[in-house]
Amino acid sequence: MDFILKIWRQQDSQAKGKFETYQVTGISPDCSFLEMLDILNNRLIDRFEKPICYDHDCREGICGSCGLYINGRPHGPDSAITTCQLHMRRFRDGDTIIVEPWRAKPFPVIKDLVVDRSAFDEIIMAGGYISVHTGSAPEANTIAVPKVKAEISMDAAACIGCGACVAACKNASAMLFVASKISQLAVLPQGIVEAKERVRKMVARMDELGFGNCTNTGACEAECPKGISLTHIARLNREYFAAKLL
Amino acid sequence: MEKINTKIPKGPLEEKWAHYKATQKLVNPANKRKLDIIVVGTGLAGASAAASLGELGFNVKVFCYQDSPRRAHSIAAQGGINAAKNYTNDGDSVYRLFYDTIKGGDYRSRESNVYRLAEVSGSIIDQCVAQGVPFARDYGGLLENRSFGGAQVSRTFYARGQTGQQLLLGAYGAMMRQINKGTVALYIRMEMLDIVIIDGKARGIVTRNLLTGNIERHFGHAVVLATGGYGRAFFLSTMAMGSNGSAIWQAYKKGAYFANPSFVQIHPTCIPVHGDYQSKLTLMSESLRNDGRIWVPKKKEDAEAIRNRIKSHRDIPESERDYYLERRYPAFGNLVPRDVASRAAKERCDAGYGVGSGLAVYLDFSDAVKRLGIDTIRERYGNLFQMYDKLVDEDPYQNPMMIYPAIHYCMGGLWVDYELMTTIPGLYSIGECNFSDHGANRLGASALMQGLADGYFILPYTIQNYLADDILTPKIPLEHHAFEMAEKSVKEKITKMMQIRGKTSVDTIHRKFGLLLWETAGMERNRQDLEKTIQEFKALKEEFWSDIRIPGNDHELNPELEKAGRVADFIEIGALMVRDALSREESCGGHFRTEYQTEDGEAMRNDNDFMHVAVWECRGPDHEPALHEESLSYENIKIQTRDYKH
């Protein structure tokens, strides 16, 4: 297959970026999107040009490193996958493909398609955990968790922190990301003790870092590679109001 | 030989750890604040260690090359974590888990370390549950278990097919809490490039800031490496693209001994290779073997017809299917350990019975779907099935998966004593990057157990026994000569690589080298090929150092430069792997020498000559490495030939 790629190139966070056009030819439909970029990069290296920088690591959809904005959608045209799981068979031969970094103020561009997502770590740092010292835990089966609750918790916990939700949102809201952690811990008995403090601190940090508000458009849910549902945002709101009012 | 002091405590096996903890030296809280500890790597071992050491009150600095500590490759572990809780009442115990691990490792691991691992396994589950890890539960609300390869009890705890992710996020949360409290300082996008030794002790590291290219110096009273395995030496593996062996390799070059480098695990259930542009292989969790049945056609002509797409799996009636694991190993069937399952797949494919490209076998869920219903299968393996569907474009609920073995885990690693200290005082190695617990083959769901055991419950004790003598040592200034020299050598290596400006990309050489390593030191090894490979590696090393091309410069984000540094080390690590494979004249676990097998193709171990850990000492670039031996003795377990047939 052959493609025309329009890729965002930017030397560093201060430089002005622009789209560069590249042609790639002879790509197998079973090639992954990142492998296609590898092929392009190898050709650039052959010409002694700087290869395109993009974050990636596990290449199996779980580490959350990769994240490209492809043809106007985070992680590209397929659903419920990360960029590394996207395959060229999802495109048509001859397609022009536009590749951009995540666009959100709290995720500044570092270089080309690489952005700084440390804001997510900062939100977790503010309280996205249960405070338990190593060694102080009670015997595991003294805590019974209804199966339904455990399943909801796991649904929320599937978040990989890739940032697609922020990239998809017109307000660059991080509500789905925050909600996934709040929801995971709020439905478990272990998490209840600190629930109010947790939601207050995480939301405050999210606001400080410049993420926008949620206006319930649902773009985050639609683009989340792990299919994390908007209902978690509803739970986040409920938890937040309870923490503020009660 | 003097350096190989295992420091195994005296006394009966069951009392060693309790005795150690009761008599070791401790550091009092006021002194802990004065002591700096460097942790490199933020996977299960690194994150759990950093969190636990921070909670104790030490000053911890933790480093990762990723943009967030949450992305370390532990996150990709799928199936589960073992613990001897015996919640299923099926006869499990600490001893049983110890026994299975030693046996699964083919009697090439250290009794005392493995027993301790089994002993602390239960506490790991307690800790993770308290952190909010959403393990699978039954309708009564209590924890569920599943069975895994190499065991006859169900002792594996799991969170769907994302157990590694959930455990890592638990440890990451605990570490972020300490970062918030100021006991742990986090350094992201930083790669350790050298270790600093002062007066014979590990006292710091030199790092490269991957965004700016700045070379930085960091002091620590002790240094903990938690940098994972070196399986990406093979180019194609289930490891992350950035996973590397460079930290442990620098440690080796500075005097830390390297144990059993050739013991590498090949995982039986990965998605087969599909093209020469491929960058990595994807694992399908071993847990799938609980409900999936592995088969190939009984007739060669059927296999050929499938390969040529004249027939499909549907055209092969039940009577014409060869469930070869069930046939060869009736007692364990599809749940034989990984090394056995991998070799059996290779044997069938080499004999001409492979499907797909020829290097693939079926993993079939149709019986399980009939028996349990599609909903149960979806609940157990939903995300794995989705992943397969997305990668291969075929629905595994309707068609059997196609799988083939791939490089997955390194049992070998830095040699450590009972305290997890390397032969360099003050340098520790935890998790996959040490060698201690899995012998020649690791059982499924034991990597997560070991990483967290080392980080939460072992290192935080043993490191105090060393640091207790260091409370009066002031922080060593970064201007110290040893820091200067380490930084200089790091910069020289980078400059040398940048200046080559040859014709070949780093990936091109890595791919060539990796394929060669896979062919000679992969699932099967033999003297002739290994000897030949040593020469070929020399040529490849030469090619690397004379012909690589790295565009850009060294003071910017430059992934080609990062890769080059790692590949330079992989080529050297590969040479040591081959040397080790050559010197071990027996077949055991993941190490299968074709010269040493029984008539029906089973591994032939040689306990008389090789019941030892092969411990390699670096003697500089101009000398061959020296081989030492740590002999292994089994006082609490009967040594037998592994038998999964009866």
Image (cartoon, coloured by chain):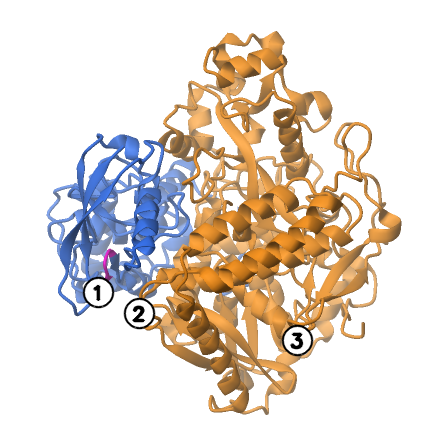
Chain colours: A blue, B orange
- The residue beneath circle 2 is B556
Does B284 appear above or below A241? above
Which one is in front in this view, the residue at disc 2 or the one at disc 3? Answer: 2
Q: Which type of secondary structure does the marked residue at label 2 adopt?
A: loop
Position of A146 with respect to A127 (left or right) is: right
Q: Quote the CA–CA distance across marks 1 and 3.
A: 42 Å
- The residue beneath circle 1 is A11
Q: Which type of secondary structure does the marked residue at label 3 adopt?
A: loop
Instruction: Identify the amino acid type marked 3.
Output: Ile
Query: In this view of the protein, which residue sits in the foreground, A187 or B547?
Result: B547
Quarter residue B324 falls in: top right
Q: Is residue B440 visible?
A: no
- Which residue is drawn at the image coordinates 42% and 74% (left, top)? B495
- The residue beneath circle 3 is B424
**x%, y% of residue A28?**
34, 33
Rendered image: mark on residue B160: none
Does B446 appear above or below B34? above
Counting other residues with Cα less than 10 Å from the Cα at mark 2, is it few (<14), some (14-19), or many (20 or more)? some
User: Which range is magenta?
Assistant: A108-113
B353 in the magenta segment:
no
**x%, y% of residue B552?**
31, 66
Q: Quadrant of the C terminus of chain B?
A: top right
- Which residue is drawn at the image coordinates 78% and 65% (left, top)? B628
Labels 1 & 2 near each other (Cβ < 8 A)? yes
Query: In this view of the protein, which residue sits in the foreground, B469 or B571?
Result: B571
Instruction: Identify the amino acid type marked 2.
Output: Glu
